[in-house]
Amino acid sequence: MKYFWIILIALVSFGAVFFLCAYLINQHVKSYSISKIKQKIEDVPDEKPQRVAIVYGAAVYKNGRLSDALYDRVKTGVELYKAGKVKKLLMSGDNSRKGYDEPTAMKNKAIELGVPVEDIIVDFAGRRTYDTCYRAVNIFNVKKAIHVTQEFHLPRAIYLCEKMGVDSIGLKADRRRYLDEDAWAKREFLAVLRAWFNLNVYVKAPVGGEKEPIEQ
């Protein structure tokens, strides 16, 4: 019985330390990024050279329809383009399994919404936010970016890309209430911890490839 209590106390102590560390890391990432998040397109500065809009992937259904969150990301990216804030859209998403292709679905929707095909670049290996940022730097040679995704995701995206050398701001793509919104916040808590670990401790190298520099 004595050993049971020793083990229990050790587990509880470890859990408390883990949660505290995770909380502090989350607060650090949020405080680092908060001033770089823009609420609407009018808040995005006009810059020369212009930033590349990195539009992050999300779920695509079997019939090819974009999930609400992904549609709103693409729509927001298109509006940035039409407002003259960016000249190029980098559509980065998951294409790691047969029959599932986020970047092409994103590209097709952007074309449907009026963006010329020559101004859309697709990244088929943006499986995670870390991968998207890594490839933005090492494949597409992005130096300045505006990250287009929902507000809960922006601090992690900005933090990762900034730490990899991309001058970053973010534009929130929230245009409605989403069904999974509450679950997103819980998953993001651990995702931020993983992002910090990947940057500072260890990460398996993302998919590489030939360089495709985006003109800025």
Image (cartoon, rainbow, N blue to C red):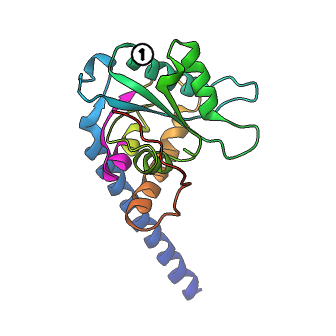
> In terms of depth relative to the viewer, which is nearer, 1 or 153?
153
Residue 13 screen position, x and y as percent: 43, 72
Residue 201 screen position, x and y as percent: 41, 68
At a point 29% along the width and 52% down the height, the residue shown is 28
At a point 23% along the width and 26% down the height, the residue shown is 47
Q: Quadrant of the C terminus?
A: top left
Mark 1: amino acid: Glu
At a point 43% along the width and 56% down the height, the residue shown is 193
Residue, disc 1: 79
Q: Residue furthest bottom?
A: 2
> In terms of depth relative to the viewer, which is nearer, 28 or 128?
128
> In terms of depth relative to the viewer, which is nearer, 41 or 51?
51
Badge 1 crowding class, 10 Å Cα cut-off, few under 14, some 14 to 19, many 20 or more, is: some
Q: Secondary structure at mark 1?
A: helix
Magenta residues? 158-172
Q: Quadrant of the N terminus?
A: bottom right
